[in-house]
Amino acid sequence: MIAEAVAGKRMTPEEIDKILMERRKQWKPKERKYKKGVLRLFSELATIPMKGAYLEYDK
């Protein structure tokens, strides 16, 4: 069994999975900063820089 540390405390993989599951349940996406206009479109459609940072629009 491999023990890893979370916040400086050693835990088993099962304990870590339990913590991550709880965090996923509580996670909520951030509210969008731009609600209209070109910046809203860009923030919704822009791909990550590693993909080239182009706008990706699928209908």
Image: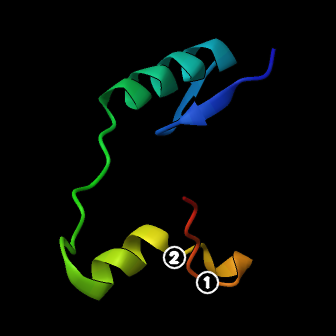
Q: Which percent across, then down, holds residue 44?
A: 41, 68
Q: Is residue 42 left or right of residue 15?
A: left
Q: Which percent across, then down, holds residue 2?
A: 79, 22
Q: Residue at x 48, y 21 (%)?
A: 21
Which mark, by number, is residue 41? none
SS label for mark 2: loop
Q: Which percent across, then down, holds residue 1?
A: 81, 14
Foreground pick, 17 / 24: 24
Query: Which residue, given by chain and number where applicable, does mark 2 sit on?
Result: 46
Amino acid marked by disc 1:
Tyr
Q: Residue at x 56, y 15 (%)?
A: 15
Q: Residue at x 50, y 27 (%)?
A: 20
Foreground pick, 32 / 3: 32
SS label for mark 1: loop
Quadrant of the image occupied by residue 40? bottom left
Q: Residue at x 58, y 61 (%)?
A: 58
Amino acid marked by disc 2:
Ala
Query: Which residue, given by chain and number where applicable, does mark 1 sit on?
Result: 54
- Residue 46 vertical placement versus 19 (above, below): below
Residue that extends furthest to the front in the rendered view of this protein: 59
- Mark 1 in CB contact with mark 2 (< 8 angstroms): yes
Q: Is residue 52 left or right of residue 40?
A: right
Foreground pick, 37 / 50: 37
Q: Which percent across, then down, holds residue 43?
A: 39, 74
- Residue 43 vertical placement versus 13 (above, below): below
Q: Is residue 24 left or right of residue 56?
A: left
Q: Which quadrant: the C terminus?
A: bottom right
